Image (tube, helix red, strand yellow):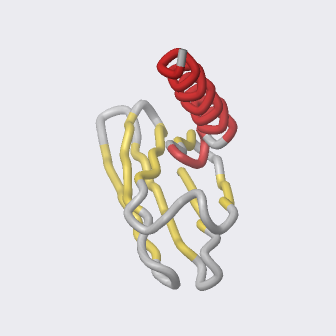
Amino acid sequence: MVDGQLLARVFIVVTAAASAGGAFGNAADPHLTKGQQRVFAAGPLHAGAQVGCTSGGIKIAARVATRGHAVSTVADGLRGSATLTVKMLPDGRVVTSCK
């Protein structure tokens, strides 16, 4: 009986964690499309987290820089180009732009 109770508790914890992950899915794996600009609250996106951008059929990605720094990624192709800018403000908020 103890094993059954433990298994039930583990199932509940795993299910709750999966549900919480869905609520923060965009912050955990943010992806922007052409023309989008988003500001993420401090916390969900940390330095090193990946942000993606799709513009003109081109997909690019960049990693969030440390507080107070920014990074830009540019890619050109036959059908268009994509530019992704990711900046972490000193307060931890992350500003993203996909062009």
Q: Where is residue 31 in the image (x, y as percent from the top left)?
A: 52, 41
Identify whether 52 is placed above or below 56: below
Viewer-closest of 88 and 78: 88
Question: How many tags in the picture?
Answer: 0
Outermost front residue:
1
Describe residue 93's horizontal placement relative to residue 78 as left or right.
right
Please tell me which residue is depicted at 38% across the width and 56% down the height of the picture.
62
- Quadrant assignment for the N terminus: top right
Please tell me which residue is depicted at 47% across the width and 44% down the height of the picture.
53
Q: Which quadrant of the view contains residue 71? A: bottom left
Please tell me which residue is depicted at 37% across the width and 49% down the height of the picture.
61
Q: Where is residue 23 in the image (x, y as percent from the top left)?
A: 69, 37
Identify whether 85 is placed above or below 23: below
Q: Where is residue 64 in the image (x, y as percent from the top left)?
A: 44, 65
Identify whether 45 is placed above or below 81: below
Please tell me which residue is depicted at 59% across the width and 33% down the height of the picture.
13
Q: Which quadrant of the view contains residue 16? A: top right
